[in-house]
Structures are given as structure tokens and as C-alpha cells.
Amino acid sequence: MAVGDLPGPMRFLVASEADEASRTQREELLRTASWTSDREFEGRPTWRHGDLALVTVPEHHLYRDHLDRDLDAAFGVPVDLVVYLSKHRSESGRPSLTVHPIGNPGAAEFGGQPETLVPAAPRWMTAALRGLRQEARDLPFEVTFEATHHGPYLEAPTFYIEQGSTEREWSDPKAAHAIARVLLSLAPLDAPIAIGIGGGHYMPRHTSVALTRRIAFGHLLPSHVLDASTLDRIDRAVDRTPGAQIAYLHRKSLSTPLLHAIERRLESLGIRVVREADLDARAKDETS
């Protein structure tokens, strides 16, 4: 198929040969829908399903910066969204399905660039969280956000979708099938766009609010990355969450002086701080 025959823009699902869960998810995607074989990307096959393209990179995707630029050049279309298929690893070993924005609020310990965030995809990512909760309702997996963390660096809106947290879960076809069904039917939410601040790595309050209220979260900054000297990280989270107008804070996880400093910072950026009661309830018949 000629480059000119492809619609634009495109959404790209990115698998990694170096990631077992990523390979499992790729195979479930290929089994679950009808895909058209497309051009090679850097010597590897790719597939297309509507405006979705499924590609594979050889290295672990954490360390592959500027992939969106390479995809644009290879496919000749704008990159609307990048979703990385990935494993999740945690010390608890708890079976989990997660989604999260990417970038490094601080040091770049696992790919990407230090003190640099990648554009979030709040309406797509929050829809994916809700979809996972629906598709995995009969599976023994916890469904949750994770805070913004790790690379790679891109300029296109991006999020990770992960299954874990041990080798047993990485090869679980049922978990991968749930992810495949979510990604194949994914549509952006019509909801106010927010950044999330406070709490631990799994952002439990923000996960709960996203599942029950009309809100779409972009960047998520946990308590441990913020103090009085690092409030500029909030500026970057707002800048890299396109359309952000509000912020939801896990207030109990923040000291009173830091909470007030964060509120002042957000006000200076034109971002309104909301509480759960300020948000409309999610419609009962809303499935994504």
C-alpha cells in the first residue's frame, strides 16, 4: 500500500521484542481483530486496523527516544497517539493492569530526559483505565493508574498500558486479551482535563475519582516528587497536559504548608483546584 493511501493522523501501538508482556499483548491484538499487513518498520512487520497501526521495536521501549519522529517519517502521516504495550513489575508481585503518562519529574533513571515530561493523552488514557476495569472485571487483577515516570522521550501524546507484576502475569493471555479489547475499541472521553497531585505511586484517590466522576487525568505527580523547591514540576505537568483546566489533589497526603503552596502555584497557572463533590458523577451507562 502506498504511503498516500494511508489516512492521517494515525494512532500507534508499540510492542517491544525485549518485553515478554508486550509480545503477549501484540499476539492477542492480532488474534482479536482483522489486521492488514502493512510496510516494514525498521525491518519488522507492521499491521493496520482502521486508524491503528501496530509496530514493534527491538529494544526495550524505555530507551527509544523520538520514536514518534521515526514513525512519522516511515509512515508519512502525523502521529496522533502512541500507546506502549508493556510489562509491569512491582515488589509486591500483585497482579495489576495499569496505565500511566510518561516523563521524568526529576532524574532520568529509566530512559527519557531529566526534568522533562512527554505530552499526556488524558482523554485516551482515562478511557483506557475505565475500559480495563470493565474488561478485567472477572480477572484477579487490580486496575489502577500509576504516576508519571520513566522514558522514553517523545513529542506526541503518549501513555503506557501494562500487565504484571511477575513473569506469570506477563504471559497471561486473558490479561492481554482484556488489554487488546480495550485498545481496539478505545475512544477519547468527553470530560474536563485535569492534572493529579499527591498520593503514592499508584495514585489511588485519582484512580477512584477517574472511575466514578467525569474527569480525564493527564500527568500525575505523587507526593514524593514535590516539595517547596520543586513546584516548577507542576508547571511542566500543566504544560504537558494539553487542555488542562483543573487539578485534583490528594489532600491528606500533603502537608498543610505544601498543600497551600501547591494551591497558590496552580492558581498562578490558571488551574482551578477541585474536590470530588465539584465533579459530575460518571453516567451509569458510560462504558468507556
Image (cartoon, grey):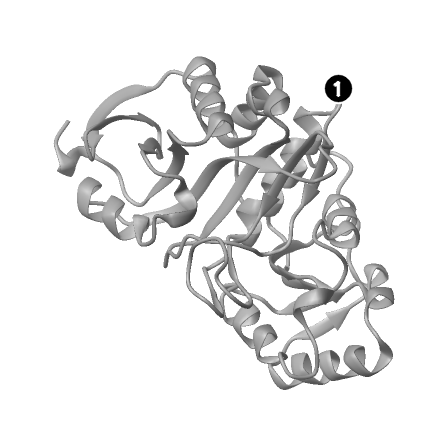
Q: Position of residue 79 (x, y in %)?
A: 32, 48
Relative to 256, say whether 39 is above or below: above
Of 118 and 12, the residue lying toward us: 118
Residue at x 78%, y 45% (from the top left corner) = 212
Q: Position of residue 245 (x, y in %)?
A: 61, 69
Q: Is 171 or 76 nearer to us in this picture?
A: 171
Q: Which element carries disc 1, helix, strand or loop? A: loop
Left/right of residue 280 with respect to residue 225 in the rendered view? right
> Height in image: 110 above or below 284?
below
User: Is residue 257 left or right of 26 when viewed as pictured?
Assistant: right
Residue sitting at x 74%, y 84% = 261
Q: Is residue 150 left or right of residue 67?
A: right
The reply to whether residue 114 is visible in this rendering is yes
The local crowd at label 1, few if under 14, some if 14 to 19, many if 20 or more residues have their Cα within 10 Å, is: few
Q: In which quadrant is the C terminus drawn?
A: top right
Residue at screen point 78% across, 79% down: 258
Q: Is residue 45 above or below residue 58?
A: above
Residue 288 visible at all? no
Q: Percent from the top left, x then y, of residue 124?
A: 53, 45
Q: Position of residue 110 (x, y in %)?
A: 48, 53
Residue occupied by mark 1: 138
Q: Classify residue 23 by image quadrant.
A: top left
